[in-house]
Amino acid sequence: MGRISDTDRTRNEEAIRAAMDRLLRGELPPGGRCDLKTLAAEAGVTRTGFYPKKDRDGRLRDGPYQHLGNEFVRRLAAHREAREMPDPRDAQIERLKAQNAELKSRVASKDKTIEELTVFKKLALSRLAAQHDEIAHLRNSSTLAGSRGRLLSLPGDR
């Protein structure tokens, strides 16, 4: 593809800036996202203009609209930091990530509680078993010495 004239480049840059403003305001085309691909499509330029080019001798040079692509990425990052999501899908993704983190925290808390209750249950069961064994041992004894030296018999199971 040949070089473009200065007037065409200026016209394309204006179209890119206008499309950039629309996308960052949240005016997305159906099926579009707030990204360089949609920006190029909305401005009517090829997406490759936003990326570096390689000369025949292997050296890299900036694409004709790379500075605008970098500006778009910076502005989009600033919107995201300010929690202003121009793309509703990005906002939904952020909301779902936050919800997922909160749910993971809740599950971890519940797991900790379950672990603590399991330890408590084992301790309580072992104490009950020890008490039961002691009671059974005492019941199996035929007699016990009372406080006045009398022999008493323990009642059996009810």
Image (tube, grey):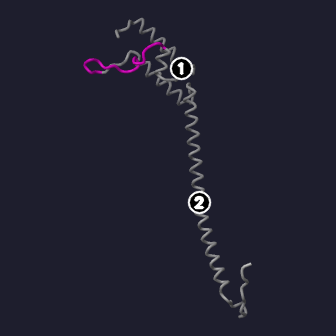
**Quadrant in the picture for the C terminus:** bottom right
Magenta-span inclusion, residue 51: yes
* Left or right: 156, with 113 as reference point: right
Q: What's the distance in space between the residues labelled 1 and 2, CA to CA?
A: 52 Å
Residue 76 in the image: state x and y as whole percent.
50, 25
- Residue sitting at 47 percent across and 12 percent down? 44
The disc label shown at residue 51, or none: none
- The one nearer the camera, 69 or 130, is 130
Quick check: 119 above or below 87? below
Label 1 SS: helix
Judged from this view, the residue extending furthest toward the bottom is 149
Residue 30 in the image: state x and y as whole percent.
56, 20
- Residue sitting at 55 percent across and 17 percent down? 22
* Left or right: 38, with 142 as reference point: left
Give the amino acid type for the residue marked by disc 1 in the picture: Leu
The disc label shown at residue 116, or none: 2
Q: Residue at label 1? A: 23
- Residue sitting at 60 percent across and 64 percent down? 120
Residue 6 in the image: state x and y as whole percent.
39, 7
Q: Which residues are magenta?
A: 43-59
Sequence-first tag of 1 and 2: 1
